[in-house]
Amino acid sequence: MLALSQSGRATAQSPLSLRWRSLLELVPIGILFGSVVGTIYAGLATPTEAAAIGVAMAFAIAASRRSLTLKGISDALIGTIRITAMIMFIILGAYVLNFALAASGLGSALSQFLDTLGLSPFGTLLAIVALYIVLGFFIETLSLMVATIPIVVPIIVGLNYDKVWFGILMILLVEMALITPPVGLNLYVVQAARSSGKFSQVMLGVIPYVGVMLVMAALLIAFPQIALWLPG
């Protein structure tokens, strides 16, 4: 089937039946995704154990498609070593930065800053959310939690907000830090996995996902029962 492109030239267009059949190629990916995420949410495996299950499933899928070769295994191992080394260097740098921030009195400065704002409980909550977003640009996720939880949680409890609800909101904001530059760890992982292209393209590509996570945070603040219904 032919169709005219914007330039006026005829281009090939696959029939609808062929498009539907091509969706069958996504079945192995769906099985791989389900085996990893499903075992985590079912409580059958920790994230680390689920990753190992994912590796085993990937090997099984590759073997079933007769694409499992020694060169493929070698390339996968070399790529894993490179990405792991890159992640470890980023985390090492983030821990050094976190140590420097802690030594400079970041914790006490944050506490004094929040105490002197004189805002309403809702205004203080919004200030804390904005604080997590800004700090997420520069601090690795684990370091961000270690540096802020002892300061922020007592304030949240004092304002009569639910700790379970705030924990879910905080995790959402901390996870957003993984995709916000310049210290967004997942950005570097994606860039390392790409065969070509600029890092700025990766940063532009995550903008919709950051927007979705901000919408999720807004919904959690506006409707706390989204987070509290299941625990209740």
Image (cartoon, rainbow, N blue to C red):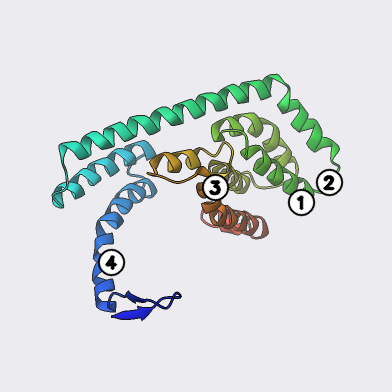
Mark 2 lies on residue: 119
- Check whether the beta carbons of the residues at disc 4 and disc 2 lie within 8 A of each other: no
Between discs 4 and 2, the one toward the N terminus: 4
Q: Nearer the viewer, mark 1 or mark 4?
A: 4
- Check whether the beta carbons of the residues at disc 2 and disc 1 lie within 8 A of each other: yes
User: Mark number for residue 203?
Assistant: 3
Label 3 SS: helix
Mark 1 lies on residue: 122
- Of the 4 image quadrants, the one containing the C terminus is bottom right
Side of 130 relative to 201 (left or right) = right
Residue 232 in sight: no
Kind of residue at disc 2:
Leu
- Check whether the beta carbons of the residues at disc 1 and disc 4 lie within 8 A of each other: no
Work out whether 119 lies above or below 85: below
User: Mark number for residue 206?
Assistant: none
Q: How many angstroms separate mark 3 from mark 4 (CA)? A: 29 Å
Q: How many angstroms separate mark 4 from mark 2 (CA)? A: 53 Å
Kind of residue at disc 4:
Leu
Q: Position of residue 41 (x, y in %)?
A: 39, 49
Between discs 2 and 3, the one toward the N terminus: 2
Kind of residue at disc 3:
Met
Between discs 1 and 4, the one toward the N terminus: 4
Residue 150 in sight: yes
Toward the viewer: 73 or 170?
73
Crowding near the residue tagged with mark 1, few <14, some 14–19, many ≥20 C-alpha atoms within 10 Å: few
Crowding near the residue tagged with mark 4, few <14, some 14–19, many ≥20 C-alpha atoms within 10 Å: few
Q: Nearer the viewer, mark 3 or mark 4?
A: 3
